[in-house]
Image: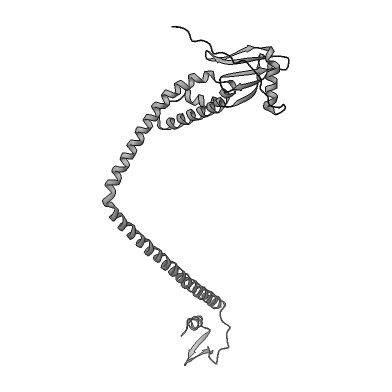
Amino acid sequence: MTLLRALLLAAGLVSFSGPGLLPAQSPPPAPAQPPDRASVAVLRETIAQWVETERLLSEETQGWEARKASMAELLEVYRQELALLDEELSKAGQSAATFDADKTKLESQISAQRAARTGTARAIGKARGQLLELSKLFPPPLLETVAPDLDVLRGWKYSDEDVRAGLQALLRTLEQAHRFATHISRSREIRDGQELEVIYLGVACAYYFGGDGTAGIGRPENGAWKWESRPTLRDRIAQIADQLEGDAHPRLLKLPVPARPEAPKP
């Protein structure tokens, strides 16, 4: 007997007669009565629940098949990971014998690096003071270029990070100073409220001229640059500026070289 037939029998809408399912017969004396409405409602609700149960069972079966396939794939991944782990453990066991030797080697390298940092810090500390003192003689354009690195050197203190920062500032300053010292440089500067064009021959001396006949020479002296007025040099300095600019043909011109001050006698 199927579930649907059982439901119909329970509702009293059919009766069981022999092997088949036949409609229920009313006794001859009594007139036929229509099915009770409450019974029909119960039957419909029961059938609806049965259909919903069948649907849920079907969905659950399909979901289980999908989950089973996913679990099988996951188990395969786990098997592969376990195989790789076994391989790595095997390699680790083989290399355990050389661990102590590698550790000793690394400790030696670290010790050597610390010693090198200490030596570098001492060298920076020594060169730092000399360079800061020497920077007082830098021409204004060079001084402006290296000003950030000089600030780093002024505030430098030894530490792992400061060794790197101090060394970089020191090397950049020396590089810029060397470049300036080996080239002829031109600069426009304001001095005493007047705009001047200045030609630097390295870091040793300079020549300047202005638009109103102003001219002169300069040199580093006693921790600063000393400027001396030489109006008679104005035309020659201007011609040199034109040659550097490419506005005049190159030719030799004589200019005085400022003498260095004599060192005081003991």
Image quadrant where residue 139 sits: top right
Residue placed furthest toward the top: 266
Image quadrant where residue 108 sits: top left
68 to the left or right of 262: left
Residue placed furthest toward the front: 252
Q: Residue at x 30, y 58 (%)?
A: 90
As drawn, 233 above or below 83: above
Total labels drawn: 0
**Front residue of this view, candidates 18 and 159:** 159
Image quadrant where residue 29 sits: bottom right
**Front residue of this view, candidates 67 and 1:** 67
As drawn, 33 above or below 219: below
Q: How is the image coloured?
A: one colour
Q: Position of residue 92 (x, y in %)?
A: 31, 54
167 to the left or right of 112: right
231 to the left or right of 161: right
Q: Position of residue 187 (x, y in %)?
A: 64, 23
Q: Position of residue 147 (x, y in %)?
A: 54, 24
As drawn, 81 above or below 249: below
As drawn, 215 above or below 66: above
**Front residue of this view, candidates 114 and 62:** 114
Q: Position of residue 266 (x, y in %)?
A: 43, 6
27 to the left or right of 196: left
